[in-house]
Image: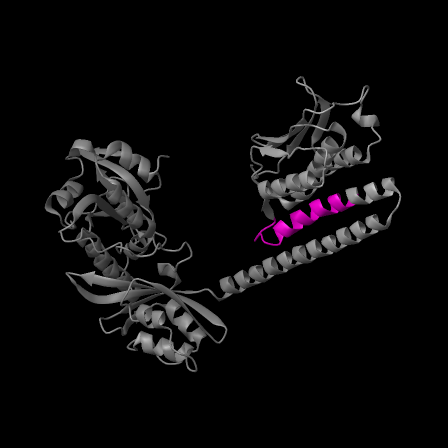
Amino acid sequence: MPTLSDLVARHTALDAADLDWLHSLVSDWQLLADLSFADLILWAPLLGENGWIAIAQMRPTTGPTVYHDDIVGSVAAKGERYLIDTAWNERRICREGDPDWSTGVPVREETIPVRRAVEGGEGRFLAVIQRSTNLSSARTPSRLELTYLQSASDLAQMVAEGRFPFSGEEPILVRSPRVGDGLLRLDRAGRVTYASPNALSAYRRLGLHADLVGAELGRITATLCYSDEPINEDLMIVASGRAAKETEVESGGTIVQLRAIPLIVGGGRIGALVLIRDVTELRRRERELMTKDATIREIHHRVKNNLQTVAALLRLQARRLQVPEGREALEEAVRRVGSIAIVHETLSHAPEEFVDFDEIADRVIAMAGEVSSPEVAVMPRRVGGFGVLPSLIATPLAMALTELLQNALQHGRPKRLEVVVEPALDRLNVTVWDDGRGLPEGFDLDSSTSLGLQIVRTLVEGELSGRICIQPRLEGGTEAVLSIPLPTGVSP
């Protein structure tokens, strides 16, 4: 399905500022749909204004939908939809007309012109919202439904006046309170004129024992939450409905999220809506995850420190050995332990069990170049990027690279040494090549007695479930080709 941006770019004359305004509207118009108990369809004028195209659609969560199929992308000729044409031409909300029975159920149609606020001007009309209400379940409205409908009417008027969405407002969070979570309606003085059952329950959990209706929301909320502390200024602004902002309050172990929506109609503030959500359990889980992440990072940090201690002990022991073969074996062990320590050091700074392997590869390459023999005047280099990889792949891959680089430097005596990364859709292809002496005659990886190559083969085939091939290069030298499968959902 084409996106709102695609439809606007292809079929309308709206500019980038207009598109931003429509994105802001659509990101928050679930509120209008739920308060209206109605479907919303956003119609934009086609190029030349000879018709309309539906560029967005929203269904209510508080009532039955009218449109079970998607309308986005549909085109209506000029004159085909009288209410849309009237709202656009007369710049007003249109509510006239009898219910429409063409779909088999009675539907009340209304249209709302969408105006974008322009500093120092009257604004610019961009589109028309069609509001369709399914009347099949109509009944005597309750106080809650009447409050919803009145609030929807005020919001619709704000859309027509270019006052909603709020210009310059911070993007609404995905987890912001919704209408069904809890709603308070305030008057101009910030006093509660209506409290939904869910909103009242949230304040009961905060410790409220008095009646909420008629109370000044800012003062009573501050009393509940800040008895021994300085009052949060954001709380007073949000709870009084003076600005379109969000905040959280906590009392007695309960955390409640508040979002204020000032109602500004006809140039003056007539009150506000405050959406309320009890986020106690959500915040508790987030804190547990943060604690878990911090613990995991601390474990990686300690493992890295322990590995560095082991490497230091091995290095110290190597210096005391008089046998060259033993000293060389311990130095190789130091490099192997060091490559693992690099992975754990990176993981100790990562919020998840994924790491940027390019950073690890560069450090492994640099380490191999630094510890190579003085007569080998070459610094390995990387071509291509590994991307972000899971730690289960990062650790054995880092060790395999260490062994291959060290083997090439020690036995090949090359002038050039490169690690070439070629990401595929579901695999990672890595080639380590050099222009050195090449492989010994009759070389066979399966029967090789080299400890380093045995380690590489075990890591690649055993732990990474990949394939490895070590062969002569046509241009001279040697190349080791690794092909490693990536888990589902991981791409380099």
State the colouring used for the structure image: one colour
Q: Tell whether position 344 is magenta.
A: yes
Q: Residue, x 62% and y 44% (percent of image)?
A: 390
The extreme front residue here reads 375
Seen in the picture, residue 474 relative to 299 is either above or below; the reply is above
Report the magenta residues as a range: 333-353
Q: Position of residue 20 (x, y in %)?
A: 28, 45
Residue 141 in view in this figure: no
> Which of the two residues, 255 or 397, is positioned nearer the viewer here?
397
Residue 274 in view here: yes
Residue 348 sits in which quadrant? bottom right
Q: Which residue shows up at 23% across the image and 67% down it?
A: 271
Q: Is residue 319 left or right of residue 115?
A: right
Q: Is residue 453 left or right of 115 when viewed as pictured?
A: right
User: Which of 313/148 is in front?
Assistant: 313
Q: Nearer the viewer, residue 203 or 399?
A: 399
Q: Position of residue 142 (x, y in %)?
A: 29, 64
Q: Quadrant of the C terminus?
A: top right
Of helix, strand and loop, which mostly describes the magenta segment? helix
Residue 312, position as x, y percentages in the image = 76, 53
- Considering every residue shown, the one lying at the far right of the view is 323
Magenta run includes residue 27: no
Say how many tags the image has: 0
Query: Quadrant location of the N terminus?
Result: top left
* Quarter assignment of residue 301: bottom right
Residue 287 screen position, x and y as percent: 54, 63
Residue extending farthest to the left is 90
Judged from this view, the residue extending furthest toward the bottom is: 228
